Amino acid sequence: MNLKDLHDKICTTLKKEISAIQTCEVYPAIRKELLAPALFVELVSLESGKDPGTEELALKARFEARIVTDSTIENAPIIVRTLAAEVARVVNKNTWNVENVSPGEFISAEIDGFRPELDAYLLWLVEWSHQLHLGKSIWTENKIKPHTITIGENVRE
């Protein structure tokens, strides 16, 4: 699993699934012109994840997507909130078709007032997380994969 590929697939999928998005970028550079509505995707933290028992590094990756719209367009407050809800819908349970990435877990969507360089726009923040497994699994070389067995008892009457 390559983090650059994951970022690219997230951005590509969001733009494809939400036709209103005009610009989608990862780690954007600040510039003077922006084709909006725009979406900016960032990986903001990595924490220890749930160990899969394969000797791969397990990480919980938290992502943010910022939706940016022009505050002067008609119905801008409704548009930005609608886009935030759509982003939440797309990221939830999405694996982006990337191996070793768990289904996304939507965390929250809210107004983002912490980017002073974007004060002229309406800005909403959508957060979600994935479990990632990095490295080689010890089980793939021998073609044995860990699995769960449920043991119970049959009761005869």
Image (tube, rainbow, N blue to C red):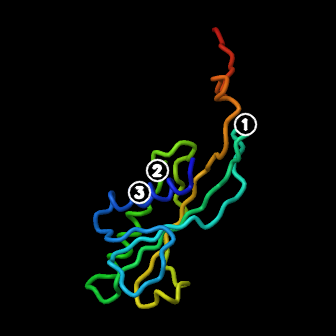
Residue at the disc numbered 1: 53
Counting from the top left corner in percent of width and height, residue 147 is at: 64, 27
| In this picture, residue 107 sits left or right of residue 45 | left
Name the residue beneath numbered marker 2.
94
Asked which secondary structure carries label 1, the reply is: loop
Q: Which mark identifies residue 131? A: none
Identity of the residue drawn at 39% across and 56% down: 13
On screen, 125 above or below 118? above
Residue visible at 56% across and 51% down in the picture: 2
Q: CA distance from mark 1 to mark 3?
A: 29 Å
Q: Is residue 96 visible?
A: yes
Contact between labelled residues 3 and 2, with CB atoms less than 8 Å apart: yes
Q: Position of residue 96 (x, y in %)?
A: 46, 50
Viewer-nearest residue: 20 or 5: 5
Q: What amino acid is at disc 2?
A: Asn
Judged from the image, the secondary structure of the residue bearing numbered disc 3 is helix
Q: Find residue 90 and name its label.
A: 3
Q: Amino acid at mark 1?
A: Gly
Residue 3 image point, x, y percent: 56, 55
At x 49%, y 88%, the residue is: 117
Is 79 or 10 nearer to us in this picture?
Answer: 10
Give the Cα distance between marks 2 and 3.
Answer: 7 Å
What is the secondary structure assignment of the residue under circle 2?
A: loop
- The answer to whether mark 1 and mark 2 are in CB contact below 8 A is no
Position of residue 96 relative to residue 66, above or below, is above
Name the kind of residue labelled 3 in the image: Val
Tell me if mark 3 has few (under 14), some (14-19) or many (20+) residues whose alpha carbon lies within 10 angstroms of its own.
Answer: some
